[in-house]
């Protein structure tokens, strides 16, 4: 049986990842860089995903251990970078995380959650 909190954390990551995907599909990287509030909104959404993933690491280490193909340390590092060094963020890293890494993370976690529930 899957812990309900585990399910909720993964679903929140999935939902925020979908919001990020919708945002980046509607806006170019240049548009986001040119709009301070759009850029900060995207960064905040990435923070949400990274913070939720960090909570997964802290609260559900057995699940995280079973998802070894995720760069958990890098995710925690992104969360810390956003929280403490937000004026030093590299916009290329932010964009790559939003366009490439977050959708992959969400997909992997949802798939593993489904498989975890069957085990």
Image: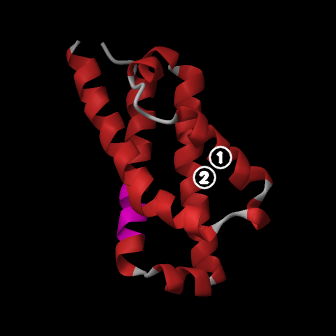
The residue depicted at 63 percent of the width and 78 percent of the height is 37
Q: Position of residue 72 (x, y in %)?
A: 54, 33
The residue depicted at 40 percent of the width and 31 percent of the height is 69
Inter-mark Cα distance, 2 to 1: 6 Å
The residue singled out by tag 2 in the image is 47
Q: In the rendered picture of this protein, how many numbered marks are placed on residues? A: 2
From the image, give the main secondary structure of the stretch colored magenta: helix
The residue singled out by tag 1 in the image is 79
Q: In the image, is residue 30 above or below residue 94? A: below
- In which quadrant of the rendered image does the N terminus lie? top left
Q: Position of residue 13 (x, y in %)?
A: 43, 45
The residue depicted at 63 percent of the width and 48 percent of the height is 78
What numbered label is drawn on residue 61? none
Answer with mark 2 or mark 1, whichever residue precedes in sequence. Answer: 2
- In which quadrant of the rendered image does the C terminus lie? top left
Contact between marks 2 and 1 (CB within 8 A): the answer is yes
104 part of magenta stretch: no
Tell me the magenta residue range: 18-23
């Amino acid at each position: 049986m899957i812990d309900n909190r585990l399910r909720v954390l993964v679903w929140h990551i999935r939902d925020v990842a979908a919001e990020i995907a919708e945002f980046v599909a509607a806006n170019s990287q240049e548009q986001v860089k040119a709009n301070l509030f759009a850029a900060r909104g995207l960064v905040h959404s990435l923070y949400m995903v990274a913070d939720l993933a960090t909570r997964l690491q802290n609260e559900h280490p057995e699940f995280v251990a079973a998802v070894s193909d995720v760069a958990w340390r890098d995710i925690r590092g992104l969360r810390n970078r956003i929280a403490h060094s937000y004026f030093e963020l590299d916009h290329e890293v932010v964009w790559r995380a939003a366009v490439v890494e977050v959708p992959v993370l969400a997909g992997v976690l949802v798939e593993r959650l489904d498989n975890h529930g069957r085990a």
